[in-house]
Amino acid sequence: MHVYIYNADIFCTECGNEYAQELQDNNVKDTGDSDEFPQGPYSNGGGEADTPQHCGNCGLFLENPLTKDGNSYVAAAAKRSGRAVGPNGYLETPGEWLAFYDYIEAPPV
């Protein structure tokens, strides 16, 4: 999935394009600085990370690759029952992650 980086956050294509359009409508120019204007699109959900990434606006799972620590994080989250609030403040759905990261086995509860 392609993503945009803006204001120290990561956004899905739809949200990144909406921010870009809003800024363009207000005559803000793209200077190449992600603090001023959405930069991207970048592939692979923004790249490898220690946790599954979600859009900073709508919460969409961005399907990024994981580090070894990220694999452990997903396995541990799957072991917990129900949903958990993750580091980005959104409710995380380990089942959705396990469907995408199908090489990770959920440990027994």
Image (tube, rainbow, N blue to C red):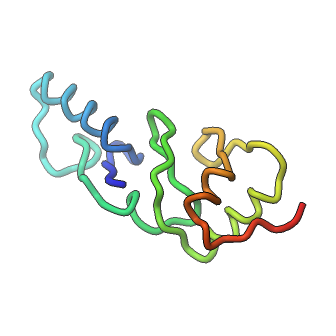
Q: Is residue 72 placed above or below 11 in the rendered structure?
A: below
Q: Quadrant of residue 74?
A: bottom right
Q: Position of residue 18 (x, y in %)?
A: 27, 31
Q: Quadrant of residue 51?
A: bottom right
Left or right, 109 with respect to 15, comes to right
Query: In the rendered view of the protein, which quadrant contains the N terminus?
Result: bottom left
- Total labels drawn: 0
Q: What residue is at 32 percent from the left and 53 percent from the top?
A: 2
Q: Position of residue 63 (x, y in %)?
A: 47, 57
Q: Residue furthest bottom?
A: 68
Q: Nearer the viewer, residue 75 or 95?
A: 95
Q: Residue furthest right?
A: 109
Q: Position of residue 52 (x, y in %)?
A: 56, 57
Q: Nearer the viewer, residue 83 or 29?
A: 83
Query: In the rendered view of the protein, which quadrant contains the C terminus?
Result: bottom right
Left or right, 21 with respect to 95, comes to left
Q: What residue is at 61 percent from the left and 56 percent from the top?
A: 97
Q: Residue furthest top?
A: 26
Q: Is residue 102 placed above or below 13 in the rendered structure?
A: below
Q: What residue is at 24 percent from the left and 37 percent from the top?
A: 17
Q: What residue is at 55 percent from the left and 60 percent from the top?
A: 100
Q: Position of residue 21 (x, y in %)?
A: 19, 29
